[in-house]
Amino acid sequence: MAKFLTYSHDDTWIHRLCGATKLIFFILWSVLGMITYDTRVLLAMLIISMIAFYMSKIKYKQVSMVFKVICLFLIINILAIFIFSPYEGTKIYGTRHDLLHLFGKYTLTKEQIFYECNVALKYFTVIPAALLFIVTTNPSEFAASLNRLGVNYKIGYSISLAFRYIPDIQRDFNEIKQSQEARGIDMSKDVSLPTRVKSMGAILFPLIFSSMERIDVISNAMELRGFGKSKKRTWYTARPFTRMDYMVIIFTVVFSIISLVFTFYDGSRFYNPFM
């Protein structure tokens, strides 16, 4: 059974980083990716993200489904931007260079293409960081790291449970899917997309009910063991910050500050190559 978005243990320097370090990197990287529209900064972030993703040795099959879904969402988003605001780029950059008149009021411009390329870049700079955070972080160790940063251990434990039970949800999904197919519900590529989407309802509702049952079991088990009674707790998988952790945090903070200064030095967060 193929699994995706699950923690995979490997002996790389990224796996050896403390979970809190990877969380700090992910948050700063995401905020920077959302703020800047400077193509030069986004390209630098993309290169760094891809290098880190390659060095983590994450197997493609673990993230292939996520990449496909995000690429589909990105295509829909870009098309929606062009349909509802075909001249957003010209408004932002203050110039207009027509390339091709399509129909009606829709004309393809250099500014619009450049703007939507920046939108795509923003996606692909943040996605690798998110995948690195999820796939290379041990859920239990991550909860302990959050607690060391001052986050209440109940919140940290809740987040670790969410990551830990992703494989169980995937297993339930596949089992329910196989059961429904055995009953004659066709979800293969041989049927049309609307039919497959409609058939997904036969999977989602049982999956939701099984997940709710698991939540009830876990809640009762934690309550019986007195979880949450004490203000503090010890951690079996706690990992101290190492020299590499401090280096990654310093690099991320310094890179974020330099990138923001570079982005806003001319008073605008948009890099304009048309002036």
Image (spheres, helix red, strand yellow):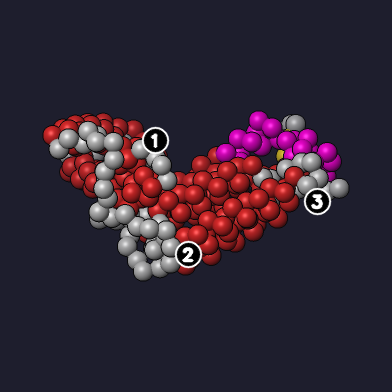
Res. 273 mark? 3
Marks 3 and 1, the one that precedes in the sequence: 1
Alpha carbons under labels 3 and 1: distance apart: 43 Å
Residue under numbered circle 2: 244
Residue under numbered circle 1: 194
> Horizontal and vertical percent for residue 117?
66, 49
Alpha carbons under labels 2 and 1: distance apart: 49 Å
Q: Is residue 230 visible?
A: yes
Q: Is residue 4 visible?
A: no
Say which quarter of the image contains residue 132: bottom left
Outermost residue toward the right in this view:
275
The answer to whether marks 3 and 2 mark residues whose Cβ atoms lie closer than 8 Å is no
CA neighbours of label 3 inside 10 A, class few (<14), some (14 to 19), many (20+)? few
CA neighbours of label 2 inside 10 A, class few (<14), some (14 to 19), many (20+)? some
In front of the other: 260 or 110: 260
What range of the chain is rendered magenta?
A: 77-99
